[in-house]
Amino acid sequence: MTSRPELLVSVDVGGTLGMADGPGLTMRLVEASPLPPTRTREILRSSLHTRPALTDSLVHEVCEAIQVPAETFPRDVPPAPFSLYPGTADALRQISAVATVVTLSNVTCVDADTDGMRRLLSPWVSDFFPSCRIGYTKPDRRAFQAVTGHFGADPSGLIHVGDDWTCDIVGAIEAGARAVWISRGRQVPDESLLVDHGVLVADDLVAATAHIQHLAPRSAT
């Protein structure tokens, strides 16, 4: 019987593994709200993204917060099809050879297509931790702790990979995990984290694979 790798890797979904082929509920609400997009996303992360079901009270709560009429709330939005970036499947295959791989994403219960993700990412991804399931969104350290707690792992044994600097990288570091930032050519927002916390930078998941393979032996020490 093959033993489970000691290294645990969580990966963000949208922007890291691939992109949705169309607007989901979050994007539609951000576009409808008169608030600045960044502020709207913050509100949605703390409310809509942490709930397991879409109820009337939740709809009214969210609409009031983002200043959108409740009657215009898009209730019947199916999850948009998700397409992997080139090389993602092979990168996950290589990472899964040295680590247990799971997803950790900020997503609404409407947009979270766990069954579709499982079909798309099997057999390389072992489990899925959407925020609407665990009740916490990144960068809240409890989101990362939901992953490590599930596997009985220490936060220092977790490597989180993601493209959002605040949610993925700052959140992982504050939770005591290691982090790999998917830059896609962007400038590092805070180089002190690279020096002080060993944050690694990769253009995409394919490039991040080499970092993770290099770190894998250290997880056993």
Image: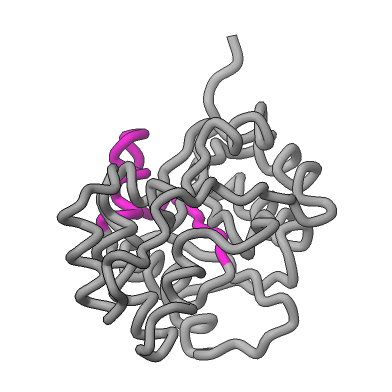
Residue 142 left/right relative to 180: left
Residue at 46% across / 60% down in the picture?
25
Residue 180 lies in quadrant? bottom right
Residue stretch in magenta: 142-162
Residue 49 left/right relative to 96: left
Residue 67 coordinates in the image, percent (x, y): 27, 81
The residue lying toward the viewer, choosing from 59 and 102, is: 59
Q: Quadrant of the N terminus?
A: top right
The residue lying toward the viewer, choosing from 39 and 206, is: 39
Q: Is residue 15 above or below residue 43?
A: above
**Is 19 one of the magenta-colored residues?**
no
Furthest residue in direction front, as rendered: 71
The residue lying toward the viewer, choosing from 58 and 161, is: 58
**Is 150 one of the magenta-colored residues?**
yes
Residue 66 coordinates in the image, percent (x, y): 29, 78
Residue 89 coordinates in the image, percent (x, y): 77, 43
Magenta stretch: dominant secondary structure: helix
